[in-house]
Image (cartoon, coloured by chain):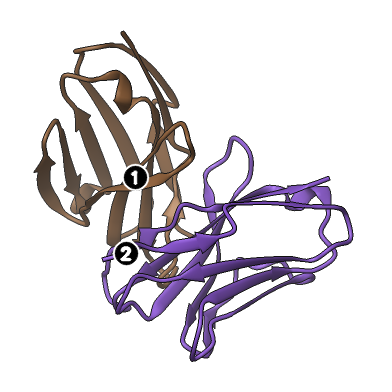
Chain colours: A purple, B brown
Amino acid sequence: NAGVMQNPRHLVRRRGQEARLRCSPMKGHSHVYWYRQLPEEGLKFMVYLQKENIIDESGMPKERFSAEFPKEGPSILRIQQVVRGDSAAYFCASSLDREQQTQYFGPGTRLLVL
Amino acid sequence: GIQVEQSPPDLILQEGANSTLRCNFSDSVNNLQWFHQNPWGQLINLFYIPSGTKQNGRLSATTVATERYSLLYISSSQTTDSGVYFCAVEGGAAGNKLTFGGGTRVLVKP
C-alpha cells in the first residue's frame, strides 16, 4: 500500500517562473492537505481539499498561490511568478475521512527559487 | 487560533540516555500527532494520540487532554533518533488543519 506520493522531490525555478507541485494521496483517502515549511521553521497549514472542493484555504497567500484536487488525478499546488521567499519545503498530507483521523505526510517537494 | 509550544527547543543526548519531550496546547483538541523529521527532511508519523498512552518500541507518548499537554518519551536513545520532533494538534476552532509546534531538535551522540 503506497504512501502519500509527491513529485517532484526537488524543483528549481528562476524568479517569475511557475511552480507546479503534485500530490497523490494514499489509496482510499479523499482528504488532502498542503503545508509549507520555511527553513528552520515548523510546518504551517496552507489549504485543505476534498475531491473537486476547497474546504479551507485560510493559510494560502492571497496572490499567486492556488490549489486543486480534481475528480481524477493528483492534487496540484500551483505557484505563479515565484519569488525567492517561496523557497521552502512543501508537504502534502492525506487522511481517510474528516473526523479525528491521522494525517499521513508525503516526502515533500523542496522548491528553490534562484 | 490554537497555540502549540514544545520544550525544550534543543536536546543533546548521549547514546543510551532517556529523555522526555513536552507539548503544551492552548485549547481542547480532536487530534494530536507526534512526528519525527529525520535529517533528510522526511516526516515520519510516530503517534496519533489525542488522549491516553501509547507505546511503540523505545518510544511512548502520553496525552492528558484535560490539562492540555502531551509527552513523548524516548528510551535508550540511538543516533538514528536524531532529528526534529514535532507535535501537531487539530482542534479548537481550527477545523481539520494541524497546527504544529516549533519542534524539539534532538542530537544523539555516539
- Secondary structure under badge 2? loop
Q: Nearer the viewer, residue B25 or A79?
A: A79
Asked whether the beta carbons under mark 2 and mark 1 sit within 8 Å of each other, the answer is no
Q: Which of the chains bears the disc numbered 2?
A: A
Q: Are marks 2 and 1 on the same chain?
A: no
Quarter-wise, where is residue A58 in the image? bottom right
Q: Residue at x 54, y 87 (%)?
A: A70
Instruction: Decide if residue A12 is on the left or right side of residue B21.
Output: right
Which label was assigned to residue B55?
none
Q: Which of the chains bears the disc numbered 1?
A: B
* Disc 2: which residue: A2
Residue B74, percent across and down? 21, 27
CA gap, disc 2 and disc 1: 19 Å
Badge 1 amino acid: Phe
* Disc 1: which residue: B35
Q: Residues within 10 Å of mark 1 (few under 14, many from 20)?
A: many
Badge 2 amino acid: Ala
